[in-house]
Amino acid sequence: MYKKNILTLFFVFLFLLSGCAVKQPSEEKNLIIEQQYIKAVFIPYYEMSEFTINSNENEFKNKINKAFKKLEDNGFNRVTVHVRPCADAFYKSTYFPISEYCFGAQGSDLLFDPLEIMIEIAHKHNLSIEAWINPYRVSQSNDYSKLSNTNKAFEWMNTQKVYSGDNGLYFNPADKDVNELIVNGVKEIVSNYAVDSVCFDDYFYPTKAEDIDEGYYDDYKANGGEKSLQDWRRDNVSNMVKAVYSAIKEINPMVSFGISPASNIDNDYSNLYADVEKWSSEEGYIDYICPQIYFGFQNESQPFMKTVKLWCNTASCRLYVALPMYKSSKEDEFAGNGGRLEFVKNNDVVARQITYLSKLDQVKGFYLFSYSSLKDNEETKNLYSAMQKSFE
């Protein structure tokens, strides 16, 4: 009896020892991802639609396989797919209806699960996959009748939980039910899908109008709140970001969470109420930040190199830079006279930006906007050449 107990304890000890010594596959993979220089591509909802609408499951798989193989072959290692562009979903959700951009009508049946399929195919092609979300945007129309009756915003239409902005309907960041919905929506993705990371877009407060959350702010003041409307709004957004980060880490600490804000830090802070400096320099908000530096070297208001350096001096977390491949060969109308034709006259602007970023220790990767801009032309050839030479 004694010998049997000793033998049993010996095997238990070996089992525990092996469990401590060997990393779980998901942890090992995500550690590798964190150590990589990220080379990512955004696939926005309107490009996703070209894959999903009028496709059956097999057709969708073939299209995505071709697209992701192309990314792998050309040196990319991450794909960031728009899975919740508004209060809707490109996946099976108990909180949000199926997106109108997915199968043509909001609230339609889930003919197949695009996110599940994309995860499988991305990992087959050695791409990490990121779920890209617009947390507050409800719709790009102000017409509530266009919402599915299963949409939470439809249920909340006569309350301050949803308001009309200049470019559609938005959830109100001041409302606790809204923030709970956003957190639960992210938890659902991280719990049910093997995504490697989650990315929030740059839509926060899209208006400075004071009436949109007047009742909430009056309650705050009545209960002894002393912050200005502007600081209170920034707190609303920051508290949501922190809650999302905590929820992700509680479910799977290896899933990264980041935000891709507009590149003007002052504008983010003052007009969108997004305290990007706080998020990217303090613990507990985000793992990375990826400012959308969609400017050329000759842009007169935000020249590329100057803007990148500003972010290098701001962010303590992992810093990626989103690049404007979509501007290739196009006039840049807001770049001033000096930069207006930069992308027309030069077919290597983004290629040179990649080379520049590769020399900066603070920058850990780049994102291209967007997939459809990777055309068979000189700009793309120069881009691939710069990627190869910069990361040999």
Image (cartoon, grey):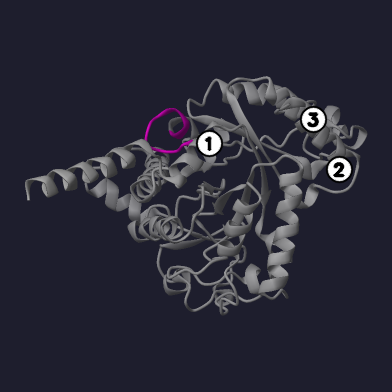
339 and 380: which is toward the camera = 380
The label nearer to you, 3 versus 1, is: 1
Q: Is residue 136 left or right of residue 340?
A: left
> Rounded to the nearest whole Å, what is the CA distance between mark 3 and mark 1?
23 Å
Query: Marks 1 and 3: in contact by CB < 8 Å?
Result: no
Q: Residue 32 carries which label?
A: 1
Where the C terminus falls, by quadrant? top right
Lower position in the chain sequence, tag 3 or tag 1: 1
Q: Is mark 2 on a helix, strand or loop?
A: loop
Amino acid at pointer 3: Ala
**Residue 281 highlighted magenta (yes or no):** yes
| Residue 264 visible at all | no
Count residues near mark 3 (Cα–Cα under 10 Å), then give few for <14, some for 14-19, many for 20+: many
61 and 237: which is toward the camera = 61
Measuring from the top left, give residue 298's x and y in whole percent. 80, 26
On the image, numbered disc 3 is attached to which residue?
Answer: 386
Lower position in the chain sequence, tag 3 or tag 2: 2
Amino acid at pointer 1: Ile
18 and 154: which is toward the camera = 18
> Rounded to the nearest whole Å, what is the CA distance between mark 1 and mark 2?
37 Å
**Residue 94 highlighted magenta (yes or no):** no
On the image, numbered disc 2 is attached to which residue?
Answer: 330
Q: Is mark 1 on a helix, strand or loop?
A: helix
The label nearer to you, 3 versus 2, is: 3
Q: Which residue is drawn at 54% across and 38% down?
A: 33
Residue numbers of the magenta segment: 279-287
Relative vertical location of residue 201 with respect to residue 53 in this rendering, above or below: above
Measuring from the top left, give residue 293's x and y in whole percent. 67, 34
